[in-house]
Image: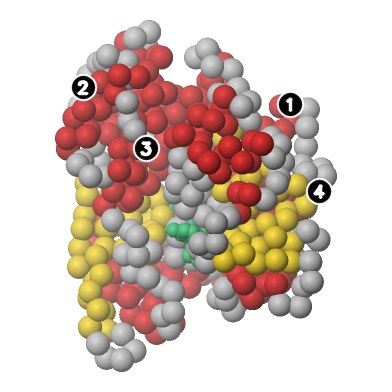
Amino acid sequence: MNDTSSLHPILQPTFETVLQRNPGEAEFQQAVFEVMQSMSPIVGTHKRYAGRSIVQRICEPERQIIFRVPWVDDKGEIQINRGFRVEFNSALGPFKGGLRFHPSVNLSIIKFLGFEQTFKNALTGLPIGGGKGGSDFDPKGRSDGEVMRFCQSFMTELYRHIGEYTDVPAGDIGVGGREIGYLFGQYKRITNRYEAGVITGKGITWGGSQARKEATGYGTVFFADEMLRRVNDSFEGKRVVVSGSGNVALYAIEKATQLGAKVVACSDSSGFVVDEDGLDLEALITLKEVNRGRLHEYVEGRPHAVHTPTGQGSSIWDVPTDVALPCATQNELDESHARTLVKNGLKLVAEGANMPTTPGAMALFQSAGVLYAPGKASNAGGVATSALEMQQNASRDSWDFETTEERLRQIMIDIHDDVVNTAEEFGRPGDYVTGANVAGFIKVADAMLALGVI
Ligand code: NDP
Ligand code: 2IT
């Protein structure tokens, strides 16, 4: 899959070393290969980024922590999970990135996420390094008490590694406001410090930021809106399909609808829903956020809505659409999905999730002339607003929703312009993948070069 011969000769041995050092870590290797492909056209001409082992150093996490998380379930039985925190790069600021609780979590997934996060955070222009963590704990079907006991045990180990100036976690898949509350509560209890800036995604009344919950989904749509504006188009009247129905998906649906689009489909791991009337966001939020329900319940009492369970030969990407916003998980949109989407008239893809598009699908979109934005640019609004939460915590201030949303919108416009200008400067106009990877890489590499051999 990762054809080393397509890389610049300077990068080939570097990538071989990554393969040898990280055997079997398919997701991590995939993420590194994509960045090296983008760097290939420039390492020959920009010698600064070819020497001093800068690419090798960027591919090696600063620190990787793996720990046992024992906890007691409601039946009184002891459960053991595995916890991770990969502190990838702190050249630009404290390690920053979410925690994912999902049964699929392993070291490869956390490393790919931490690697991507490093460039994403650089693109925000805010002083945050990159990291990621999580556990193979599955919150589905667990009671509030079980989730709390798990979070308390997880933080009992994690607390010694994090801090306002060291490493600042947040949410990701399976980690929302409830989990952040339990994690912060335990941190506060162990350390005897109300150190609000140690974690982001907090509740509004205890140090959280307005618009953080909405930020990733809103930011993805703001970014896509800029892509459309660049080609004299807009969301007005567009058909939109959003995969997932979690935090990122729900607020992408909201903002796209506010901008005049009709969002006709969303999904979870059990299936997808199509509602030709346009999805009813209020009902979705009640179902998913308040009741923690499953998506198939949405169609009850809605004659125009259809639910298709997973495993029946079709997927959400069979639904014809102008705009696709993948907001569920990595590698959820493959080459055959991409072919169907293009055949059905797709114009734009902006990733709300991290690496949801496989390399084959990405290549197909680019060759078909579909506007395509990689997650490290288009979903950066979540972590950017986390950095705004840190700013508010540091100044013991809190901003109103409109101010915070406007800051977020401006950050997404700035990232968009930075990515577009970088792609143009490096001879790939309109190529958001090259633009994002090169612009992010340069910011991290320049800081590392200035800081000596770190
Ligand atoms: P949530 O846990 O809130 O929602 C995840 C959604 O994706 C659910 O609908 C879930 O369905 C679905 N999903 C998860 N795993 C799979 C899978 N293996 N197959 C099919 N569907 C799946 O997470 P978020 O919305 O926070 O995260 C979604 C994506 O966005 C992730 O890639 C995350 O890394 C990325 N992201 C999140 C940010 C944030 O601020 N939260 C910021 C930037 C990126 P089900 O309920 O059935 O599991
Ligand atoms: O992937 C991501 O950018 C996130 N899960 C958000 C990270 C954060 O620190 O807000």
Let me know if residue 216 appears in the view.
Answer: no
Mark 1 or 4, nearer chain start: 1
* Residue underneath mark 4: 260
In this view of the protein, which residue sits in the foreground, 422 or 159?
422
Q: Counting other residues with Cα less than 10 Å from the Cα at mark 1, is it few (<14), some (14-19), or many (20 or more)?
A: few
Horizontal and vertical percent for residue 439? 47, 26
**Image vertical order of residue 257 relative to residue 207, above or below:** above
**Whole-Å distance between the Cαs marked 1 and 4?**
17 Å
User: In the rendered structure, which amino acid carries the disc numbered 3?
Assistant: Ala
* Residue underneath mark 1: 231
In this view of the protein, which residue sits in the foreground, 31 or 51?
31
Q: Is residue 172 left or right of residue 398?
A: left
* Residue underneath mark 2: 13
User: In the rendered structure, which amino acid carries the disc numbered 1?
Assistant: Val
Q: Secondary structure at mark 4?
A: loop
Q: Secondary structure at mark 1?
A: loop
**Whole-Å distance between the Cαs marked 4 and 3?**
34 Å
Mark 4 or 3, nearer chain start: 3
In this view of the protein, which residue sits in the foreground, 306 or 279?
306
Which quarter of the image is occupied by the N terminus?
top left
Mark 1 or 3, nearer chain start: 3
Mark 4 or 2, nearer chain start: 2
Q: Which mark is residue 31?
A: 3
